[in-house]
Each structure stands twice: as C-alpha cells, then as structure tokens.
Image (spheres, rainbow, N blue to C red):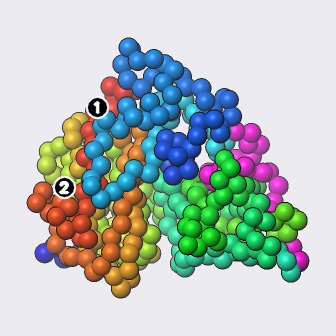
C-alpha cells in the first residue's frame, strides 16, 4: 500500500483554449442543423489526402475515435477532432457576435455587453438554488457544470432562460431554457434539477492579467427569468481558478464531490504518472492532486497530468482512475476524464460508489476486476504532434 502525502507547491503556466465538450454538444448529442450555417462549414479533412474535405462532424468524430478504446465502465460524453479546433467550427457556441472580451464561455450562452438585470420584486417570480455546496475549482480548458434546482409557481414551462455573470468581468450571458426544442432539466425524477455548463479559456483575472502560479477566486451569479420577465434572486457560486501546466498531452480528472479519486496515466515506456510517481523522465508530471487522503487540497475536485510541448512520446497511453478513499461516507461519486491529445479532445464519464481502497491501481490485473475501486478509462494512441500540424 502506498500512503499519500500532502503535495508540495508546484510552478504552473497559463492555460489553453477552452473546448466545451458536453452531452448537448456535437459530436454526441447536438444536431448539426441546430447550428448557424457558418458553423456547419469544415475547412480540413480528418485524415490523409484521399479523404473528402467535406466530412461531416460525425464522420470526423468517428475517425478520431479510432485512436481511443474506452474501458468497460465509462461512456464517451463528447469529442472534438483537431480539425474543428483549427477551424474554430464551434465559435458560434461561444464567441460569434461578441462586442466585449471575457475569458468565460457558457454553453448555448449569448454574451451581452450590458450588466445583468436586477432581481424582480414580484412574489410570483421563479426560484433558484444550488444543489451542491462549497467552492468550485475551475481549470482552464476543462468543462464545468453548475448544479441548480429551479422552480416557478406557474410551472417549469414558465421558465424561459437564465442570466449568468462573473464578478468584475464585463457583460453577462443569457442562456435560453429550451435548447433545440429540448427542455433543459436533466433528471425525470427531479424535474427542477438542471446543470449549466461553462468554463474559462485561460486563467485570466478581471484586470486582464494571467495567473501563472497562484489560484484566484471569483464569484458566479445566476438568476432564472420567466415569461413575464420576472427575474429570480441571484444564487452565488464561489469559483477558484487554478492555473496548471500545459502541453501536447493533458489528462484531467474532475469529480462531482470532494472525495479521494486518483488519476493514473501509463505512457508508452511503461512508466506511470500518479500521486506516488509525480514526474517521469521525459517530463510527464502530476501537477494537481485533489482531496489527498481526505485531508489535503480538499474541495479542489480535479487532478491533472500533462506532458509539456514536444515531450510526449508517441505510442499507446492508458488512463486509470482509482477510488482511494471515500470522503463522503461511501456515497456515489461521478467523474469525468478529459483527454487532450495533440489538439483533439475527448471526454469520458464514470462512477464509483462504496468505501474505496488504498492499493495502487497500476497492475494490469487490477484493471476493472474490481470496478468499485479501479477503472480503466481509456487506451489512446499519441502520434508525434509535429506530424499533425
């Protein structure tokens, strides 16, 4: 058994461009016809010169996924091939028509230059509350979800949208409650439960400066609006933006609760980066370890491993997640793993329940033999990134 220790402070560099990869997005769930015409154009083919430049998004996604073999206990939540990153094919989701600049992005959100409207005084206005407590850690380039519960005296169909603002950043976002004809609530057993998906492109402070070493905090404000234009009280969520290392290959673990899950990545040489081996010879390193032994970095709820630009060896990588210890009394915990591989991104989702196990999740015989403790997330192939530019 390998005991965990409190991680030392580490130097970090600015983040990278954000890609919001969520169930409502292409390539998994968003219908191509929902996009404005300019967002449906594709400038680059997925593979070699014999492929058609007009490959549609699903064809590009399927070609990309040939490099990824998910484990048996995870699902693929979304993906974005490198061609779409280069062509900014999803700019309509976040940046089209902006007249002000902000590093924040909100899925399906329209950025408006003026300040968010004030709360209405009507007693028949909508209600809104957070479904989770605590500070939410934000990593540049990694999608996030704010769990909310909405109510309205005239029924949920009376809700038309949400106003979202970030303290001391310009403007605010408006998100409609109906996307592509589908109502936002996500759980039939809890119709008022919704999640608003958002993220930050770079760890940029309100004054425009980039955080390179130390995290900083800001506040997210959200209100619901009904058909009569009544605006609910704003709920506030404290955010901690944490700058991390960047590179050609990055793997980020995000967990839904403050519990001790651990991220492992085995590189082609066989070396494994994890909390017991934070750095390997070619530069791969763990620079964020969350909720260690339910004592250190509590509430961070993210772990991050990366290989600096030019350092990631070509070959096969394996990603594992282990349930080291439950800090939430054995309650279920959902997680996502975001793999950024030479410009393309894929997001996987899984779940743990129970008490966990302090053994290391590295040996092939461990993988998926006890899925309540150790899960193989994905095996993926890295080609030399310079060959893909």
Front one among 210 and 178: 178
Rendered residue at 59%/36% (across/down): 32
Viewed as shown, does residue 277 lie left or right of 176? left
Res 363 visible: yes
Front one among 332 and 307: 332
Kindly indicate whether the residue at mark 2 contacts the one at mark 1 (C-beta within 8 angstroms): no
Q: What number is the disc on residue 272?
A: 2
**In the rendered image, the vertical position of residue 89 relative to residue 101, given as above or below:** above
**In the rendered image, the vertical position of residue 183 relative to residue 42, given as above or below:** below
Percent coordinates x, y for residue 263 in the rendering:
29, 61
Viewed as shown, does residue 187 lie left or right of 68? right
Q: Which of the two labelled residues, at mark 1 and mark 2, occupies the earlier sequence position?
A: 2
Percent coordinates x, y for residue 301 in the rendering:
42, 69
Magenta stretch, main secondary structure class = loop
Residue placed farthest to the front in the image?
A: 188
Res 82 visible: no
Residue placed farthest to the bottom in the image?
A: 329
Q: Indicate the quadrant where residue 366 lies.
A: bottom left
Residue placed farthest to the top in the image?
A: 50
Secondary structure of the residue carrying tag 1 is loop
Q: Residues within 10 Å of mark 2 (few under 14, many from 20)?
A: many
Q: Residues within 10 Å of mark 1 (few under 14, many from 20)?
A: some
Rendered residue at 49%/41% (across/down): 27
User: What is the quadrant of the C terminus in the image?
Assistant: top left
Q: Indicate the quadrant where residue 94 lies.
A: top right
Front one among 231 and 273: 231
Percent coordinates x, y for residue 278 in the rendering:
24, 60
User: What segment carries the magenta color?
Assistant: 96-122
Q: Which residue is mark 1?
A: 384
Viewed as shown, does residue 266 lie left or right of 252? left
Task: Determine if the magenta segment contains residue 196.
Answer: no
């Amino acid at each position: 058994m390998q005991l965990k220790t409190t991680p030392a402070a580490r130097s970090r560099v600015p983040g990278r461009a954000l890609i919001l990869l969520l169930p409502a997005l292409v390539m998994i769930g968003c219908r191509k016809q929902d996009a404005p015409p300019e967002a449906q154009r594709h400038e680059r083919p997925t593979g070699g010169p014999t492929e058609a430049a007009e490959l549609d998004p699903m064809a590009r996604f399927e070609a990309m996924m040939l490099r990824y073999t998910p484990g048996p206990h995870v699902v693929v939540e979304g993906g974005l091939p490198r061609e779409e990153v280069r062509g900014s094919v999803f700019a309509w989701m976040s940046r089209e028509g902006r007249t002000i600049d902000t590093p924040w992005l909100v899925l399906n959100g329209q950025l408006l230059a003026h300040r968010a409207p004030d709360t209405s005084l009507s007693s028949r206005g909508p209600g809104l509350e957070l479904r989770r407590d605590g500070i939410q850690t934000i990593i540049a380039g990694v999608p996030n979800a704010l769990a909310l519960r909405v109510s309205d005296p005239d029924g949920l169909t009376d809700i038309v949208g949400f106003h979202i603002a970030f303290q001391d950043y310009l403007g605010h976002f408006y998100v409609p409650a109906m996307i592509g004809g589908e109502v936002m609530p996500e759980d039939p057993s809890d119709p008022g439960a919704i999640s608003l998906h958002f993220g930050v492109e770079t760890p940029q402070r309100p004054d425009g400066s980039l955080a390179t070493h130390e995290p900083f905090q800001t506040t997210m404000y959200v209100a619901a609006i009904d058909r009569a234009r009544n605006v609910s009280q704003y709920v506030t969520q404290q955010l901690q933006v944490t700058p991390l290392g960047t590179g050609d290959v990055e793997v980020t673990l995000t967990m839904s609760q403050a519990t001790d899950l651990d991220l492992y990545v085995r590189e082609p040489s066989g070396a494994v980066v994890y909390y017991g081996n934070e750095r390997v010879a070619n530069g791969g390193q763990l620079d964020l370890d969350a909720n260690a032994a339910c004592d250190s970095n509590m509430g961070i709820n993210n772990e991050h491993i990366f290989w600096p630009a030019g350092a990631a060896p070509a070959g096969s990588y394996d990603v594992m997640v282990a349930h080291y210890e439950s800090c939430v009394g054995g309650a279920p915990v959902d997680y996502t793993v975001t793999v950024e591989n030479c410009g393309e991104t894929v997001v996987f989702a899984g779940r743990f329940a129970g008490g966990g196990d302090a053994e290391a999740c590295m040996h092939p015989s461990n993988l998926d033999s006890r899925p309540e403790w150790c899960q193989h997330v994905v095996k993926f192939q890295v080609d030399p990134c310079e060959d893909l530019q």
